Amino acid sequence: MNERIKKLRKDLGLTQQAFADRLKIKRNTIAKYETGRGEPIDAVISLICREFHVSENWLRTGEGNMYLELSRDKEIAQFIDDVFSNESDTFKKRFINMLINLSTKEWELLEKMAKDKVKE
């Protein structure tokens, strides 16, 4: 499992510290998992799977796909959650806030602009 935890972390582009922070555990605990000097308990395995949408079967055995298949709506919700929980004042956060505050007329204008762009 140690190699799969490391592979997951690297695939996510996270440092050991950032990975640990997302799980609210210590960085040296992640280092122990990755080097095989420690095995995560079931609660940590569940937390990794839930936080990063990872298949528990893959994490435990290496079989199947690394990530769980998400519906488009869940994927969007996860993206928004990630932006608001992990990033400070970024363009992504400001853009989502701008979208949240659009009026009905502004949404209609945005939709028209998108349709016009697709026709080009």
Image (spheres, helix red, strand yellow):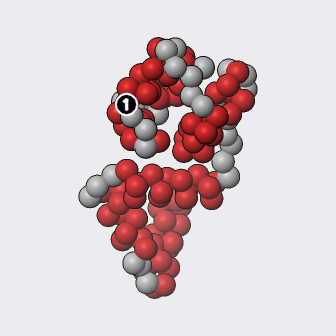
Q: Position of residue 36 (x, y in %)?
A: 52, 14
Please report the residue visible at 43 percent of the width from the left and 27 percent of the height from the top.
29
- What residue does disc 1 label? 27
Q: Amino acid at mark 1?
A: Arg
Number of other residues with Cα within 10 Å of mark 1, as a class: few under 14, some 14 to 19, many 20 or more: some
Q: Secondary structure at mark 1?
A: helix
Is the residue 114 above or below the residue 35 in the image? Answer: below
Viewport quadrant of the N terminus:
top right
Residue 7 visible in rendering: no
Which quarter of the picture shows residue 61? top right
Please report the residue visible at 47 percent of the width from the left and 77 percent of the height from the top.
107
Residue closest to the far left: 89
State the residue in front, 21 or 70. 21
Which quarter of the picture shows residue 47? top right
User: Is residue 40 shown left or right of residue 91?
Assistant: right
Please report the residue visible at 28 percent of the width from the left and 55 percent of the height from the top.
88
Residue 100 visible in rendering: yes
User: Is residue 94 shown left or right of residue 70?
Assistant: left
Is the residue 22 above or below the residue 107 in the image? Answer: above
Q: Position of residue 15 (x, y in %)?
A: 36, 30
Q: Position of residue 5 (x, y in %)?
A: 53, 25
Please report the residue visible at 62 percent of the width from the left and 59 percent of the height from the top.
73
Is the residue 68 above or below the residue 58 in the image? Answer: below
Q: Number of marks in the image?
A: 1
State the residue in front, 101 or 57. 57
